[in-house]
């Protein structure tokens, strides 16, 4: 109860072109009495009988999306009908979340007790095994955006249908007596078109709120591109790789809105994220006499986003800027959250500012032109989110890695939107990395050391983070927090993404020296984000001898 079955069911039915029915509402319509009234006058047993009869009738219909009462699952016959006649979606939420959603609802007879939390815990203990028994798809509600949940359901319905049709085809080939195969639903051809609709998220920072828009072919959408630009002048900062691909398209869109466009094209590469190139942006802004109403646009990956954001934060003490990330890593991580800056030979990202953009616009079409190494580099940050805070997402990534590597649009849209949701929620709670936000640096203490030790640009940032997560998992295991099984799962997923799992041999002293220069460190002690389990992390220090064991093992063992 209270997880949003009716709300999500209605939207899903509309997306699929089906009819929506809520079994509780149907009972109320036929009896002329509310559910709470039926409970009060006839008792729960009588209501459950009516409910079972309604489930039997409704599951016999075709072309519907049915939202059932939370307790309907208790009836064995109803469970059988649900499992045999349809595709069952289990919307799962925590006790805390359900209590928050239902605490003021007086129309839930089972919760009219002195201790509703205890009642919800008891109901969950009783019902959850049955939900899991019949569920074809499990969706974790939590803080997820409704659009994202709908996207996930549509995608998983598509996958179920594909698996079903593949199995049926196999049966037909193996059995010459078979003449037909039954589709799991009649809606499988309708999902793809809906998944190209943009997803809209929000970074909630009070008066500095800003939207994240994720979709295909957004560079040509005039309204999306210009709705957050107040002035007529726009400075587009990009690099020598992205400019030939997308600069002209973006300029045409901006010109349609009457914008005057100024270009800054920088060299490509992590090694170019430096003071000299930052000065080139300032030189252009000053030469063109740009004012406080000029909007800067970062068109490129994380390097361009970080430098453009730093320039925007510094020029005239702050001008508006918009992030248009063109790499997967930038779309899921660096473009969101307002961390800007440049590198220094002695440390990565040690010089910069917290400065939020006006908007983030992630066009997944730009990912089609990524160099071969860039896609896995972005997957590293996606894996990170599942590892530190969202085990179901980690499991989903493991199950859908092949779809992500082949750039399946549905899988990419979900992975990007879920990653942005997680990061946006962490940023909302800790914008300036005074505590919680540091967990987003899982694998980064090792990863930054790799980048600085080898020289910026030798390994991509995501490659270094991927290897860094393997090292952090090893260290988590050595201090007794993470199980060997969980550690093996993390290594396997990093490997499946095409990322390195063997660390470069920098020498123990050099490793320690490089890790000592890190923003998380305090009082000279190296801080690590380590895992207690997949989805559960903590910031801690570790004994130097154990750290040295991890360094030796990760350089030599794999």
Image (cartoon, rainbow, N blue to C red):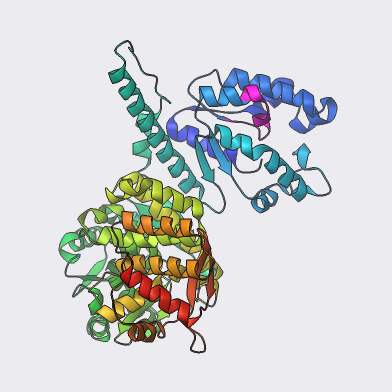
Instruction: Report how many numbered discs are placed on residues in the image.
Output: 0
Q: Is residue 397 located in the magenta-colored stretch of the structure?
A: no
Front residue (pair 112, 95) = 95
The percent coordinates of residue 12 (x first, y second) are: 49, 36
- Magenta region: 67-78
* Furthest residue toward bottom: 523
Front residue (pair 301, 445) = 445
The percent coordinates of residue 464 (x first, y second) are: 32, 70
Whether 9 is drawn above or below 221: the answer is above
Q: Which residue occupies 47% across, 33% down?
A: 14
Q: Which residue occupies 58% across, 23% down?
A: 80
Quarter placement of the C terminus: bottom left
Q: Which residue occupies 32% across, 61% down?
A: 378
Front residue (pair 435, 362) = 435
* Furthest residue toward left: 244
Residue 309 visible here:
no
| Rendering quarter of residue 157 | top left
| Rendering quarter of residue 188 | top left
The percent coordinates of residue 522 (x first, y second) are: 51, 85
């Amino acid at each position: 109860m209270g997880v949003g079955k009716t709300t999500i069911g209605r939207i899903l039915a509309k997306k699929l072109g089906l009819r929506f029915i809520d079994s509780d509402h149907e009972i109320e319509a036929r009896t002329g009495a509310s559910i709470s009234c039926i409970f009060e006058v006839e008792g729960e047993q009588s209501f459950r009988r009516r409910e079972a009869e309604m489930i039997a009738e409704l599951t016999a219909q075709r072309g519907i999306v049915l939202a059932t009462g939370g307790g309907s699952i208790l009836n064995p016959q109803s469970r059988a009908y649900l499992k045999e006649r349809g595709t069952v979606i289990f919307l799962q939420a925590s006790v805390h979340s359900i209590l928050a959603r239902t605490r003021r609802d007086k129309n839930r007879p089972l919760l009219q007790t002195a201790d509703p939390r205890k009642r919800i815990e008891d109901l969950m203990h009783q019902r959850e095994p049955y939900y899991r028994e019949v569920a074809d798809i499990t969706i974790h509600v939590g803080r997820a955006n409704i659009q994202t949940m709908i996207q996930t359901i549509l995608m998983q319905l598509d996958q179920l249908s594909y698996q079903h049709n593949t199995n049926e085809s196999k049966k037909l080939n193996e059995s010459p007596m078979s003449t037909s195969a039954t589709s799991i639903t009649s809606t499988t051809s309708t999902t793809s078109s809906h998944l190209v609709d943009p997803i809209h998220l929000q970074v909630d920072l009070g008066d500095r709120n800003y939207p994240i828009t994720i979709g295909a072919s957004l560079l040509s959408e005039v309204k999306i591109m210009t709705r957050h630009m107040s002035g007529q002048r726009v400075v587009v900062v990009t690099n020598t790789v992205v400019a030939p691909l997308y600069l002209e398209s973006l300029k045409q869109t901006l010109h349609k809105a009457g914008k005057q466009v100024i270009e800054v094209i920088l060299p490509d590469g992590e090694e170019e994220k430096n003071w000299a190139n930052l000065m080139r942006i300032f030189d252009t802004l000053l030469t063109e006499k740009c004012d406080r109403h000029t909007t800067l646009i970062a068109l490129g990956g994380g390097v361009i986003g970080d430098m453009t954001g730093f320039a925007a934060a510094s020029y005239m003490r702050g001008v508006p800027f918009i992030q248009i990330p063109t790499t997967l890593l930038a779309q899921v991580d660096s473009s969101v959250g307002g961390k800007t800056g440049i590198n220094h030979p002695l440390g990565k990202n040690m010089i910069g500012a917290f400065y939020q953009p006006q908007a983030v616009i992630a066009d997944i079409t730009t990912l089609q032109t990524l160099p071969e190494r860039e896609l896995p580099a972005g997957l590293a940050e996606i894996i990170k989110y599942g590892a530190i805070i969202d085990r179901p997402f980690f499991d989903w990534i493991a199950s859908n890695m092949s779809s992500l590597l082949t750039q399946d649009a549905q899988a990419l849209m979900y992975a990007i939107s879920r990653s942005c949701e997680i990061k946006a929620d962490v940023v909302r709670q800790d914008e300036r990395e005074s505590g919680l936000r540091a967990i987003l640096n899982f694998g980064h203490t090792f990863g930054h050391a790799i980048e600085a030790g080898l020289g910026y640009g030798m390994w991509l940032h995501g490659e270094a983070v991927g290897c860094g997560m393997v090292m952090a998992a090893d260290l988590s295991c050595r201090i007794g927090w993470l199980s060997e099984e969980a550690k093996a799962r993390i290594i396997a997923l990093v490997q499946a993404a095409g990322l390195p799992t063997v660390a470069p041999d920098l020498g123990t002293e050099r490793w320690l020296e490089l890790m000592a220069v890190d923003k998380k460190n305090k009082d000279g002690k190296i801080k690590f984000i380590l895992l207690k389990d997949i989805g559960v992390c903590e910031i801690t220090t570790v004994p130097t001898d154990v750290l040295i064991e991890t360094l030796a093992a990760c350089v030599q063992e794999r």
